[in-house]
Image (cartoon, rainbow, N blue to C red):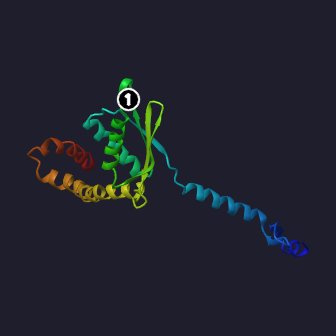
Amino acid sequence: MRLAEELGLELVEVNPRAAPPVCKIMDFGKFKYETSKKEKSSRRHQSTIVLKEIKLRPKTDKHDLDFKVKHIRDFLSEGNKCKLVIVFRGREIVHPETGQAMLDRVVKTVADIAMVEQRPMMEGRRMVMIIGPRVGVIRPNPVASGGGTAKPPGASAAPGASAAPGASAAPGASSGGGAAGGSSSPPAPAAAAKSG
């Protein structure tokens, strides 16, 4: 204790359950600050998995099914799970195999990026199945994909932007006659104002 006071630090009990309690001399305020920063950064880099629900009917048409499968692929590529629900109405409940066939068809179409986490089971008038992304599927990084798409237009815009000011000044003055004549008349009064 005296050594910690001489150094201007605190004696902190690190492990009270050890046979002799383990203590450490440290700046406790700095220790708490660094611990809270580590917790915040670990929470920031955590990814949350969301369970998205897609409702289908036993008689869902091909186009509607393709549309829903597209959404399922989007959800799975984001790293989310999908809860596939077949809703039975009226006497459709008598033939649950039609709902099972619909779920099998969906699973076959997304088998390259998805795996079944919960087999189909009946919950009242609904048949429920949960699928999740495959372990080998890589989640896209929104920053990297946004930067990749923004770069080519920025690269093409930069030469165009550097050529556009030069093009409006030099070609506008040299080709005062054609279609650029209407656009060259506003710079002419500006040039007259500069000289006058």
Residue furthest out toward the right: 2
Q: Quadrant of residue 30?
A: bottom right
Q: Position of residue 135 (x, y in %)?
A: 43, 59
Q: Nearer the viewer, residue 131 or 92?
A: 92
Snapshot quadrant of residue 185: top left
Residue 82 is at least partly visible in this image: no
Left/right placement of residue 34 relative to residue 48 reads: right
Up/down of 88 relative to 49, above or below:
above
Percent across and percent down for residue 3 are: 88, 76
Q: Residue at x 76, y 62 (%)?
A: 29
Residue 105 % position (x, y): 31, 44
**Residue ranking furthest to the left:** 178
Specify the amino acid type for callout 1.
Val
Dividing the picture into quadrants, the one containing residue 166 is bottom left
Tell me the residue at 68%/58% (across/down): 36
Residue at image x 40%, y 50%?
A: 76
